[in-house]
């Protein structure tokens, strides 16, 4: 069973245990003895089952089990002991066990709240707040249900609750060593990368962002578009070209930037508002300039209110070719615009024997599944980086994370081929039909020829534990997507030195997928869930960390600056799941 499933099952059992105790308490208060006993027995069974799930989680990694072992386990055990003891003593009047059963329910509920609202890392503050909650709720129940506790008992209860509450709040609110990220942008500090004006190898583009109504699949939808089209113009270049892209904002009130997703540009050209530049406001412009050193399939998108901006259509494709395209070379960017799926289907005849390259891009915030039917093919590149000796595939689907790119290559057969995204055909060379939904999905970690990582010791190691949690640091409380228990802008930056070898361990203990994306660098995948990668070296800029997964990746700190490092489900990033990699 995957760790992700164990996380979900454990959560469900925890809810059932708490509900069993609380229901038992209510039944006891109503003097419904058989119901109370049955629910209590059920809660005990659920608690025993949890011992199994929590042990499984702990074996998958301490991150998955920390607060369950340190906070939930003691509370649940106390619940069983107290409730069990009262039940045994309550031979005659079941009502006398009601408070104890409710206490057990509060204990399990508050442990559950610690997991849901606080998560990892477990802290003494969270534990004390949980205890305060249990004691407080029990005291209230006691008052309401009687018999009246003695004065001494009331006082002690009150004292324990207050001490736990005060200590817990104090510890929870204590300032952590998480300084906000200093803003350090130098407006317009484009590096000089040579002549771009009139010299061969210079490529100039202008992109104008504006609100627009675009027609997609016969429907007119409101969009934010570059040059009035979604996706924006396809920018193409040849390796060695110097790109100069002027961004103009006509009327996007919240501002626009251009981020070159996956393209390891100099930091000043990275397009992150508040970090590398100011957002370009209506009437303003900004010129990006960088040399196209990397061949491959990339894309650009706004990084200002990126969740809304990209969803509304402010994105486009950047393709850098080693030499002018030969054969058929097509880009297929999957996107959802106002619930219309892009791209619109294209059918073109391709002569048998023609080399074909299909550049698949996922510009949405969630994973898409692609399937190429009708021909054997190879995955030539992932995230713009060529794979080593990719084997030939048939009947195999491709899963592309948010932001990711796969280049498929094949020689056109005499019969039609069809490429589908989530079972919708988007590109075909003729009329064809093939059932692809049952195909297995390629695992890139075991595809192509293995080569040992170029380094095996790391100057810096960081662990990122992805979760959800209550974030009380801003003006309004929010249920954030967190990294190591904190949300942007309170996640400490990762500080590295130029030349460091760096290792990230990324752990997902939440119930949703997090497509991870580091700006300015490609990372080499070392392992997933403790199993070393065995295929072609995988240099990625976007990868799905599914619930319960643990990824180890490494990179060389060779591109100085301040870089965003975030989840590319852009709604998650906006809700806190973003931090920075900073060069000292
Ligand atoms: Cu494509 Cu910071 O993102
Ligand atoms: Cu996410």
Image (cartoon, helix red, strand yellow):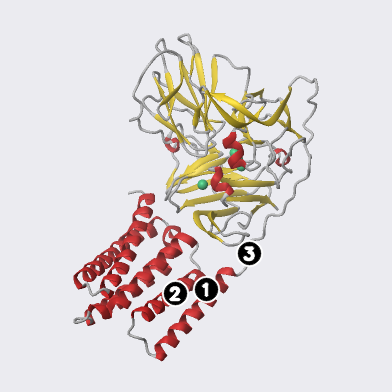
Q: Number of callouts in the render? A: 3
**Label 3 residue SS:** loop
Marks 2 and 1: CB-CB under 8 Å? yes
The percent coordinates of residue 71 (x first, y second) are 42, 69
**Label 1 residue SS:** helix
Label of residue 131 in the image = 2
Q: Earlier in the sequence, mark 1 or mark 3?
A: 1
> Regarding ligand 1, which quadrant of the image does it lie in?
top right
Is residue 520 visible in the rendered image? The answer is yes
* Displayed quadrant of residue 102: bottom left
Mark 3 CB lies closer than 8 A to ligand 2 = no
Is residue 85 visible in the rendered image? The answer is no
The percent coordinates of residue 72 (x first, y second) are 39, 67
> What is the CA distance from the residue labelled 3 to the residue labelled 2?
26 Å
Q: Residue at x 39, y 55 (%)?
A: 60
Q: Residue at x 41, y 33 (%)?
A: 442
Q: Nearer the viewer, mark 3 or mark 2?
A: 2
> What is the CA distance from the residue labelled 2 to the residue labelled 1?
9 Å
Mark 2 CB lies closer than 8 A to ligand 2 = no
Label 2 environment density (alpha carbons within 10 Å; few <14, some 14–19, many ≥20): many
Q: Earlier in the sequence, mark 2 or mark 1?
A: 2
Residue that carries the numbered disc 3 in the rendered image:
177
Q: Which residue is drawn at 63% across and 19% down?
A: 323
Tell whether 190 sits left or right of 103.
right
Marks 1 and 3: CB-CB under 8 Å? no
The foreground one among 240 and 433 is 433
Residue that carries the numbered disc 1 in the rendered image:
168
Label 1 environment density (alpha carbons within 10 Å; few <14, some 14–19, many ≥20): many
Q: Is residue 300 above or below residue 347?
A: below
């Amino acid at each position: 069973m995957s760790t992700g499933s164990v996380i979900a099952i454990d959560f469900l059992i925890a809810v059932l245990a708490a509900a069993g105790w609380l229901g038992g308490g209510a039944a006891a208060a109503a003097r419904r003895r058989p119901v109370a006993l049955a629910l209590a027995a059920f809660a005990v069974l659920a608690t025993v089952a949890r011992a199994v799930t929590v042990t499984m989680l702990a074996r998958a990694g301490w991150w998955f089990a920390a607060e369950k072992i340190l906070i939930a386990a003691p509370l649940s055990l106390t619940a069983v002991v107290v409730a069990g003891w009262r039940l045994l003593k309550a031979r005659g009047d079941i009502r006398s066990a009601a408070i104890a059963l409710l206490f057990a329910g509060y204990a399990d509920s508050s442990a559950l709240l610690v997991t849901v609202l606080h998560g990892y890392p477990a802290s003494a503050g969270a534990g004390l707040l949980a205890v305060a909650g249990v004691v407080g709720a029990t005291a209230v129940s006691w008052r309401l249900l009687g018999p009246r506790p003695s004065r001494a008992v009331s006082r002690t209860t009150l004292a324990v609750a207050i001490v736990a509450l005060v200590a817990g709040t104090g510890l929870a609110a204590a300032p952590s060593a998480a300084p906000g990220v200093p803003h350090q942008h130098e407006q317009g500090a484009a590096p000089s990368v040579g002549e771009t004006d009139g010299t061969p190898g210079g490529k100039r583009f202008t992109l104008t962002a504006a609100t627009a109504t675009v027609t997609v699949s016969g429907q007119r939808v409101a969009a934010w578009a570059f040059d009035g089209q979604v996706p924006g113009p396809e920018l193409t270049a040849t390796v060695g070209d110097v790109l100069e892209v002027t961004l103009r904002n006509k009327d996007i009130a919240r501002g626009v930037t251009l981020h070159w997703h996956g393209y390891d540009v100099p930091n000043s050209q990275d397009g992150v508002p508040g970090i590398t530049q100011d957002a370009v406001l209506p009437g303003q412009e900004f010129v990006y300039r960088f040399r196209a050193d990397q061949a491959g399939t990339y894309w650009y998108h706004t990084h200002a209110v990126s969740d809304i901006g990209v969803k509304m259509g402010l994105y486009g494709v950047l393709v850098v070719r080693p030499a002018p395209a030969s054969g058929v070379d097509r880009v297929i960017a999957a996107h959802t615009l106002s619930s219309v799926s892009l791209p619109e289907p294209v059918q073109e005849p391709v002569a048998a024997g023609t080399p074909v390259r299909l550049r698949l891009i996922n510009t949405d915030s969630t994973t898409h599944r692609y399937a190429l039917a009708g021909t054997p093919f190879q995955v030539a590149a992932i995230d713009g980086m060529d794979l080593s000796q990719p084997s030939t595939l048939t009947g195999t689907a491709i899963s592309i994370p948010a932001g990711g790119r796969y280049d498929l290559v094949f020689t056109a057969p005499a019969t039609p081929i069809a490429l589908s995204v989530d079972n919708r055909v988007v590109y075909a060379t003729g009329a064809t039909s093939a059932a692809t939904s049952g195909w297995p999905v390629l695992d890139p970690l075991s595809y192509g020829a293995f080569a040992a990582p170029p380094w095996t010791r790391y100057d810096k190691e960081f662990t990122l534990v992805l979760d959800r949690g209550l974030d009380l640091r801003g003006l309004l409380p929010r249920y954030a997507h967190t990294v190591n228990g904190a949300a942007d802008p309170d996640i400490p930056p990762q500080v590295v030195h130029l030349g460091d070898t760096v290792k990230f361990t990324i752990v997902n203990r939440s119930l949703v997928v997090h497509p991870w994306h580091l700006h300015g660098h490609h990372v080499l995948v070392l392992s997933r869930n403790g199993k070393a990668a065995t295929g072609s070296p995988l240099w990625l800029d976007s990868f799905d960390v599914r619930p319960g997964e643990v990824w180890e990746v490494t990179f060389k700190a060779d591109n100085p600056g301040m870089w965003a490092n975030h989840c590319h489900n852009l709604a998650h990033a906006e809700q806190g799941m973003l931090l920075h990699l900073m060069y000292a």
